[in-house]
Image: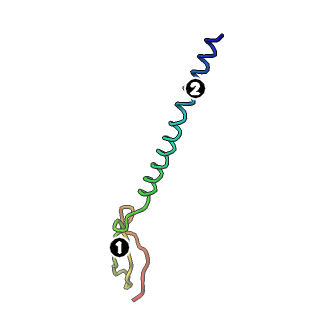
């Protein structure tokens, strides 16, 4: 009976000792992953290319996004 108590205590103690540092490491790893994901989500200002082109007698602003030139808006001449 004393052996069972000792084994149970040893198992419980090892579980408490192991679970403490793992949760803090997991929490800090999750914070690091979120930080890097947020930094990647912000597009670089130089990545978007825009040009003014004449179209139908107006000056229109086209920006290169998602693999093709897209019309943003036009100004009348």
Q: Is mark 2 on a helix, strand or loop?
A: helix
Residue occupied by mark 1: 50
Quadrant in the picture for the C terminus: bottom left
User: On the picture, is 64 further left or further right than 10?
Assistant: left
User: On the picture, is 49 further left or further right than 34?
Assistant: left
Count of picture labels: 2
Q: Going 61% across and 19% down the picture, which residue do you hit?
A: 8
Q: Going 57% across and 21% down the picture, which residue do you hit?
A: 10
**Rendering quarter of residue 69:** bottom left
Q: Which of marks 2 and 1 is in front?
A: 2
**Residue 41 spot, x, y in % from top left:** 44, 58
User: On the picture, is 56 further left or further right than 28?
Assistant: left
**Rendering quarter of residue 40:** bottom left
**Number of other residues with Cα within 10 Å of mark 1, as a class: few under 14, some 14 to 19, many 20 or more:** some
Q: Can you say whether 1 is above or below 54 in the image?
A: above
**Residue 58 spot, x, y in % from top left:** 38, 84
Residue occupied by mark 2: 13
**Residue 17 spot, x, y in % from top left:** 54, 30
Q: Going 53% across and 39% down the picture, which residue do you hit?
A: 23
Q: Distance between the residues labelled 2 and 1?
A: 63 Å
Q: What element carries label 1?
A: strand
* First along the sequence among labels 2 and 1: 2
Quadrant in the picture for the N terminus: top right
Q: Which of 37 and 19 is in front in this view?
A: 19
**Rendering quarter of residue 72:** bottom left
């Amino acid at each position: 009976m004393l052996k069972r108590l000792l084994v149970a205590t040893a198992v419980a103690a090892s579980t408490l000792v192991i679970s403490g540092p793992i949760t803090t490491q997991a929490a800090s790893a999750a914070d690091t992953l979120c930080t890097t994901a947020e930094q990647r989500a912000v597009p670089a200002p130089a990545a978007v290319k825009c040009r003014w082109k004449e179209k139908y007698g107006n000056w229109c602003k086209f920006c290169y996004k998602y693999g093709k030139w897209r019309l943003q808006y036009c100004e009348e001449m």
